[in-house]
Image (tube, helix red, strand yellow):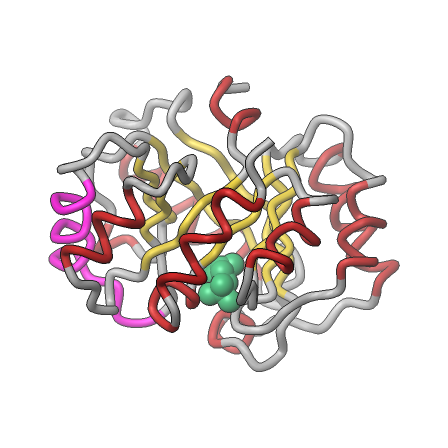
Amino acid sequence: MNYSLHEWNHIFKLDPAKDIADDDLRDICESGTDAIIVGGTDGVTLDGVLDLLSRIRRHTVPCILEIANMESITPGFDYYFIPMVMNTTEKKWMMDLQHQAIKEYKELLNWDEMFVQGYCILNEESKAFKQTKCVMPDADDVEAYAHMAENVFHLPIFYMEYSGTYGDPKLVEKVRQQLTTTKLFYGGGIENQFQAQEMKEHADTIIVGNLVYDNIKKALKTVQAVKK
Ligand code: 1GP
């Protein structure tokens, strides 16, 4: 496994479909965060991705593309995250899109730069949950998905995705106990440094998204809150 995954405590996720001012982007990139993910659910276009990439590249922070659709895949990122939605009811989101992308691009792929994420989407109201036709898992289901991510699929990342709402720290703690080598990512609804710390108690990496756009000062404070 790539060494860098072990080092990432905090990542900001920026949405190429949303505007961010140059000053704010500079502060995010220079904040001490471990990496920036470029990713979103709706309106992700190649132009939007390339624009954000070129602006992030003025800084030294590692930059990751979380692949949202075939149209917006481009070279130039340090790493690529490939989501596989584990609690979807449609095989498309777990297997078929990934299959299609690999079929098209396999000669170009460098697997040292690519990480498959076992996604478990846990906010029923989120766009991602609806778009990927998820079913809401109970706590035992989530633990079993984590166990499968590690032991059946040998994925480098299991991602508890509460996008837009703050999750259950007790469940994150339980899921942590299922994992030994697979890294636990937590994302969703982090609105301040205390929530960042609370989730980082159990997750290897926390992801902060919306707060960048809602309250940049508070977003910046989440970085130092989780540094070891
Ligand atoms: C979204 O997990 C990330 O994919 C972060 O969630 O936008 O709610 O912070 P928020």
Q: Nearer the viewer, residue 11 or 219?
A: 219
Whole-percent x and y of residue 25? 23, 53
- Looking at the rendering, the stretch of residues picked out in magenta corresponds to 42-56
**Quadrant the C terminus occupies:** top right
Q: Nearer the viewer, residue 111 or 173?
A: 173
Q: Is residue 65 magenta?
A: no
Residue farthest to the right, as pictured: 140
Q: Is residue 92 visible?
A: no
Q: Is residue 215 visible?
A: yes
Residue at 55 percent of width and 63 percent of height:
192
**Quadrant the N terminus occupies:** top right
Whole-percent x and y of residue 180? 77, 28
Q: Is residue 16 above or below residue 185?
A: below
Residue farthest to the bottom, as pictured: 125
Q: Is residue 45 magenta?
A: yes
Residue at 43 percent of width and 61 percent of height:
209
Whether residue 120 sits left or right of residue 16 in the image: it is right
Whole-percent x and y of residue 23? 17, 55
Residue at 67 percent of width and 35 percent of height:
153
Residue at 75 percent of width and 42 percent of height:
148
What secondary structure characterizes most of the magenta part?
A: helix
Name the quadrant containing residue 185.
Answer: top right
Whole-percent x and y of residue 174? 85, 50
Q: Is residue 151 above or below residue 221?
A: above
Q: Is residue 62 above or below residue 146?
A: above
